[in-house]
Image (cartoon, rainbow, N blue to C red):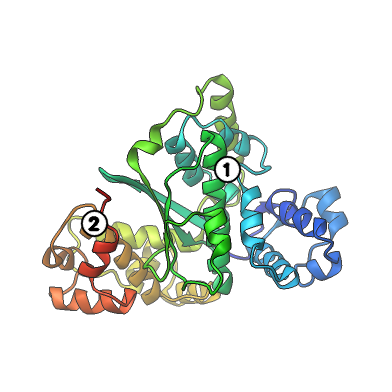
Amino acid sequence: MQWYSRDTRLLPAQGLPLLVLDFCLQQQLDCHRLLRGTRLFLDDVLQHNPAVTPEQLQRLLDNALQLLRSDDTPFLLGQRLLPGHHGSTSQALALAPNLYGALELLTELQPLLTPLLTPKFCMDEHYGYLYWLDSCGAGKLESTLVEMYTVAIIAFSRRQQGQHLPWEVSFRHSKPAHIEQYWVHIGEQLQFDQPCNLLRIPRQQLFNNWQDSGITARLARQQAQQQLQQLPACHSLLETVYRLIMEALSSPDQGRPLQLEGLAQNMGLSPATLKRHLKKHGTHFQQQLDLVRLHRALYLFHSRRLSTDAVARELGFHDSAGLRRSFKRWTGTTPSHLLTLWAPAD
């Protein structure tokens, strides 16, 4: 299999699903109500460690949120997520020499550490950026998952470095009525209604030494990579679609936008089959194409400082006016206005 989907048996039940179960049972939740609709049973999880699908994990999380009904649940869960309890994978993350090494591992070992979201990491001369993609069609859970893993990154890096780091956070969803939990667990450098879910940190913070990487760290990473290779697939369907569209947009000979038929051919599928896969994940080709175009535009505007005309050509638009109209549809604002919000600090 080239990718995993929302119904692929991928995750050991005694990993992330058991962490969620343990947290909820400590809150005195009824186990039967918590597991309703998941096709999981506590005794089976504890005794046999069955493989769990992303869809089952999402249902478990949704049940937990509905039953707990607390604004701080995503933040409290997030505190527990990294390095997690994934054997050598968690050990490798805990032994990372610095934040750069940890984020590199997070992206490499994504199916084991963050199976429902895909982290993407990049740098420019000023900052390191980590942004999140939906892996398996999270739907209404996506904003909660982003909050959970944003808290996980911030809490983990704070523990490793022994102090708060100057993270800046952007969320796609709207500002909540009560923001106190965000200030406590994330900090006050955050924005809502932004074009993507993003963490940003000054570049120099990525290389502050946490510890010396010795033989134990190298062995843990090798074992984690072996664990990764034992999975049915190392990338989700949606991440594969994103990557192939990004490669098409970034290639020097691209002269026209990628079409559904071309993408399906690259994936070894018929267009109708790819449409069905995307629909099962709550999306469609044009939505994925727009997402990649937006992210590529942000990179070209912000990190490469290209003009609107140049970005339009890179993305296959006929002219800059077409890009501006699309950018306004994607983000609700213009490129010039958005980039003033993301300008490097003095």
Secondary element under disc 1, as helix, strand or loop, is helix
The residue sitting at the top extreme is 215
Residue 149 makes an appearance in the image: no
Query: What is the C-alpha distance between the residues marked 1 and 2?
Result: 34 Å
Name the residue that disc number 2 marks: 302
Mark 1, residue position: 228
Q: Which of 292 and 199 is in front in this view?
A: 199
- Relative to 343, 188 lies left or right: right
Amino acid type of the residue tagged 1 in the rendering? Leu
Q: How crowded is mark 2: few (under 14 residues within 10 Å), some or many (20 or more)?
A: some
Task: Answer left or right for 135 relative to 61.
Answer: left
Q: In which quarter of the view is residue 68 placed? A: bottom right
Q: Which of 15 and 227 is in front in this view?
A: 15
For residue 257, above or below residue 155: below
Foreground of the two, 343 or 254: 343
- Residue 233 percent across, percent down from the top left: 55, 52
User: In x, y percent, where is residue 141?
Assistant: 58, 69
The residue located at (19%, 69%) in the rendering is: 316
**Image quarter of residue 29:** bottom right
Q: What residue type is labelled 2?
A: His
Of marks 1 and 2, the one in the foreground: 2
